Amino acid sequence: MKFKTTAATALLAFLLAAGTAQASVPRPLPSPDRPAVTPRLDGTATVSVSEICPALRRLSGLGNSRPGLRVKNLKSGETVCSFKSTAKRSLASNTKIFTTAAALAKLGTDHRFRTRVFADGQINGKGELTGSLYLMGGGDPSLGTGDFLGTYFGGEGTDIERIANKVKRAGIKSVSGRLFGDDTVFDRLRGVADSGYATSPYIGPLSGLAFNAGFTSPSLSRFSSDPAKLATKTLVRELRKRGIKIRKEIAMRKTPAAARKNLVSQVRSPDMAWMARSTNLHSNNFFAETLLKDIGAEVRGAGTTKAGATVVRRYVAALGSNIDNLDGSGLTYGNLSSASDVVKMLTRVRRRDFGDAFIDSLPVAGVDGTLASRMRGSAAQGNCHAKTGTLTGVSALSGYCFNGNGRKFAFSILMNGVTDLGAAHRGQDKIAALIARL
């Protein structure tokens, strides 16, 4: 099932999102987890404590045949309501909250990815390099042109022009060799299990030297056949624009050990807290899958989906929770967990040193991201931070609600067998609104 985000919804998401004003309006990348518009709720509606669980259970069954629900009071530790909460359900994009929590935990909120340029020869007093340059990718999902970053990332990210400027500032005026691209921090599988590890409409192609989120341009008209080659060709063009003499022809090769002692240029990505928010706010599949490979590369020395998924699974198990994960984004139906395990994970990561960054990464009801036009007019608006999830037959909403009385709740609503997505969303919205009024 292919969804399209309307221009009006994307514009609303941007205007309501926090951040500095940009010349161009950031837009979400293609994703089945589209922002939905649901009717405004009656902000005065309430329900007694004795009625709350029957009401939540009834609402969890709207639009689907296999619901799972759990709501927990974070202060008392008591379960407010549970309904089929231990049954495993397909998570869809709720998988991303496991991926981003593990990335924040294992890499740290301040972690930044490096994209570097090395030289395999000496630079003389005239700025002449006898040898070649190497553009070495570091698994940064935000690398791209300034135009692309302005369109999709609000002007944040790592722009290729900045790399070229730093090479020029290093004093290089001519290169006798060529520019080599190095994407070997990751394997060369371009997608995840749902597409047979090939590029799909919703993600890819993945690369250790990513560029423009895998697209050839801000128009999103087509995917690049090889992002690392496109990044390398673009940097050559930018170097030549700056008067640096270097041949147009590029090649791909692992950076030699000797060259890695001669750093010419280095740029760092935005920090991991920004990466997590960029992943969860608009349900960015490309970021989620790249971060999963980054986790694998950093923790297990293998930049693969399998290695990253293993790290996430073991981290979640150490929290006392559980996930059967095949990817980092939730595009594969085999990403499974239960409402109970989602709430366990949410409960425990909130107390970690990265807890605030994790909560801040989630869309806010009625305010931004995939929740910009949901739960408006209800107690949930501005008070519930939650991740959506959508696949054909799957809808999910999990996160936190903080009400005006200072009470805090973690909740998870996992709906499988969805036949009416609109009804499923309305049920989730009403559940969150009721939780926010407890």
Image (cartoon, grey):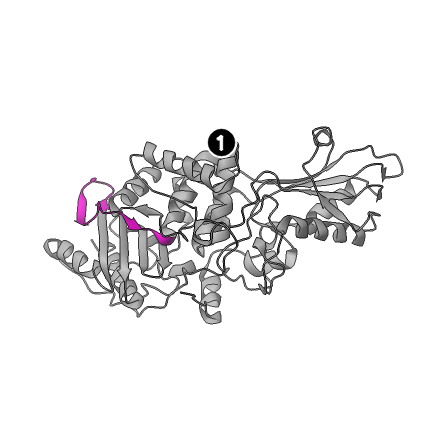
Q: For the point 67% across and 52% down, which residue is it? A: 230
Decide: is 404 above or below 344: below
Question: Does the magenta portion include 87?
Answer: yes
Q: For the point 49% across and 36% down, which residue is it? A: 296
Residue 103 x %, y %? 45, 39
Question: Does the magenta portion include 232?
Answer: no
Q: For the point 33% across and 32% down, which residue is it? A: 318
- Residue 432 falls left or right of residue 208: left
Decide: is 407 above or below 425: above
Kind of residue at disc 1: Arg
The quarter holding residue 383 reads bottom left
Quadrant where the N terminus lies? bottom left
- Name the foreground residue: 236 vs 148: 236
| Residue at numbered disc 1 | 300
Residue 420 x %, y %? 28, 67
- Residue 130 falls left or right of residue 190: right
Decide: is 192 above or below 102: below
> What secondary structure is marked by label 1?
helix
- Observer able to see residue 380: yes
Residue 149 x %, y %? 60, 56
The stretch of residues the image draws in magenta is 72-92
Q: For the point 65% across and 55% down, which residue is it? A: 145
- Residue 252 falls left or right of residue 25: right
Residue 188 x %, y %? 57, 44
- Observer able to see residue 21: no
The quarter holding residue 177 reads top right
Residue at the left extreme of this rendering: 50
